[in-house]
Image (spheres, rainbow, N blue to C red):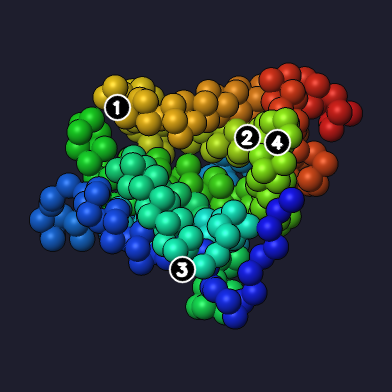
Amino acid sequence: MRRSMRSQGEKIMPVDPTIVYRRVRQLSGSGPTITPAKARAVATGLRRAAAMAPEVVADVTHLHDLTDTVAATPVSVLARPGWAQAAAVSVAPLLDDVVDGGRFADRLASEELAGALAFLAPRILGQYDPFALTALPGRGLPIAGRLLLVAPNIWEFATEWNLDIMDVQLFVSVHEFTHAFQFAAANWLKDVIIAKVQIAIDSLEDGADDDAFGDLLALMAVLEGHAEHVMNAVPIARIPSRRRITAAVAARRGRGSAVSKQINRLLGIDLKLDQYADGERFVSAIIAAEGHEGFNEIWRSPLHLPSAAEVKDPQSWASRVLS
């Protein structure tokens, strides 16, 4: 059975974000070395792209009524250690039932999380974090969600693949703001994800089958697949080099050393990418058949979320929900 949560007085979080920050800085660094002037220019460009992105996403998704709400999302432009620290703060509530408690257990959990985030830190371009309000109640984060943009990684990706930096900045912002629209459209979505994670953890601890994990991964696949679909549907007039960026993203995902590919397998990243591809096929099939208005029914109720089987058979979801 799941362990009961520790009280507020015992411990704020089961992981220490400061430890995560230090370890990721040691293991992954802050990112490629660029001049201070260039770093400021990249950060300014990212904030400009983030200001433009909500309107772009609304035009694609037809969720115009949420534009003002999403546009108010706080945006943080970070280096790799800052992203890892923010990720640790956000994931902490989901780990509270897993870590037994006590100084040694919490330190071990912090070090283990830092190791995983250090591997991911050079790969992350951006992230929408819906759990900021959950993570530190009463600790200065009274926000429903925030956008995290990893400036050195975005600059490095654009430079390495010879891409237009302004197009890349908007491309990444569109992808992440699509997630912001999802959570704004379905104000129950965060609670559903937390509940599914807890059920999956319980299932693992109790030695049950992996249906709970399949259910959770199906949901994540649809959320990520929707973001993929949206950023690939942005008109060329808005992001002229979109096709080149899409090709570079695909090539970047498939590239890596034998060691990194083995780590991908151990962390389940290869599996996630396959499932995200299923999610994008599901989203694209529904939108092709029913339009964005039909797909947007998914945000009306938790009962409209597709099962793992429906993700692989979009017509079965359409028959159940839209008819």
Q: Give me the residue at 72% from left, 41% from top.
A: 206
Amino acid on which the number 4 mark rests in the picture: Gly
Of callouts 4 and 3, the N-terminal one? 3
- In the image, residue 30 sits, relative to residue 156, either above or below, namely below
Q: Quadrant of residue 184?
A: bottom right
Q: Position of residue 120 (x, y in %)?
A: 36, 42
* Mark 2 to mark 4 CA distance (whole Å): 18 Å
* Mark 3 to mark 1 CA distance (whole Å): 32 Å
Q: Give me the residue at 57% from left, 26% from top.
A: 275
Q: Position of residue 321 (x, y in %)?
A: 84, 32
Tag 3's secondary structure?
helix
* Mark 4 to mark 3 CA distance (whole Å): 28 Å
- In the image, residue 5 sits, relative to residue 285, either above or below, namely below
Q: Nearer the observer, disc 2 or disc 4?
A: 4
Amino acid on which the number 2 mark rests in the picture: Leu
Determine whether label 4 and label 3 are within 8 Å by CB.
no
Q: Nearer the observer, disc 1 or disc 2?
A: 1
Of callouts 2 and 4, the N-terminal one? 4
Of callouts 1 and 2, the N-terminal one? 2
Q: Which residue is mark 1?
A: 259
Taking the image as drawn, is residue 53 in sight? no
Which label was assigned to residue 207? Answer: 4
Q: Nearer the viewer, residue 162 or 101?
A: 101
Taking the image as drawn, is residue 272 in sight? yes
Q: Nearer the viewer, residue 69 or 197?
A: 197
